[in-house]
Amino acid sequence: MRAAVGTAVGAAAAHARLLADQEEREIEHLMAFIIETQLKKLQRKAKYLEDLERLMEKEHALLDESKDSIIADRIDTLQRIFASGISRWKDHSSLGLPV
């Protein structure tokens, strides 16, 4: 009888170990899947940020061009004003404006 009980306990232990090994492999598989999924998400976010950075660099370049254009327009306007004979901004008499 002891031999039968020992055999049954041994068989149950072996079966339990087999189930534990299967669950461990399943957990490893799921962990690998989760890690791969998270890595893909990080790669997508990195690409998004790189695209956003390129877009911001282009926008910055356009703003610099606009700034340069505005400055050039102001300089041109001032040169035309001075060339027309208006010597000072506060000299309103030549413009016919009240003092």
Image (cartoon, rainbow, N blue to C red):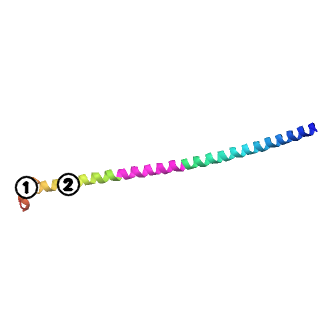
For the N terminus, the image quarter is top right
Q: Residue at x 27, y 54 (%)?
A: 69
Q: Residue furthest right?
A: 1
Q: Give the image quarter of residue 12.
A: top right
Mark sitting on residue 91: 1
Q: Is residue 71 left or right of residue 83?
A: right
Q: Residue at x 24, y 52 (%)?
A: 71
Q: Is residue 22 left or right of residue 99?
A: right
Q: How many marks?
A: 2
Work out whether residue 6 or residue 48 is closer to the camera in this orientation and state it. Answer: 6
Q: Amino acid at mark 2?
A: Asp
> Crowding at label 2, few (<14), some or many (≥20) Cα neighbours within 10 Å?
few
Residue bearing the label numbered 2: 76
Q: Amino acid at mark 1?
A: Asp
On the image, the x and y values in percent for residue 54 come to 43, 50
* Mark 2, secondary structure of its residue: helix
Q: Is residue 8 left or right of residue 57?
A: right
Q: Which callout, 2 or 1, points at the residue further toward the start of the chain?
A: 2
Q: Residue at x 54, y 48 (%)?
A: 43
Mark sitting on residue 8: none
Q: Find the distance from the CA under tag 2 to the CA under tag 1.
A: 20 Å
> Crowding at label 1, few (<14), some or many (≥20) Cα neighbours within 10 Å?
few
Work out whether residue 98 or residue 9 is closer to the camera in this orientation and state it. Answer: 9
Examine the residues drawn in magenta and state their main secondary structure: helix
36 part of magenta stretch: no
On the image, the x and y values in percent for residue 23 come to 73, 45
Work out whether residue 87 or residue 93 is closer to the camera in this orientation and state it. Answer: 93
Q: Give the image quarter of residue 35.
A: top right
Please report the bounds of the magenta region as a residue range: 43-61
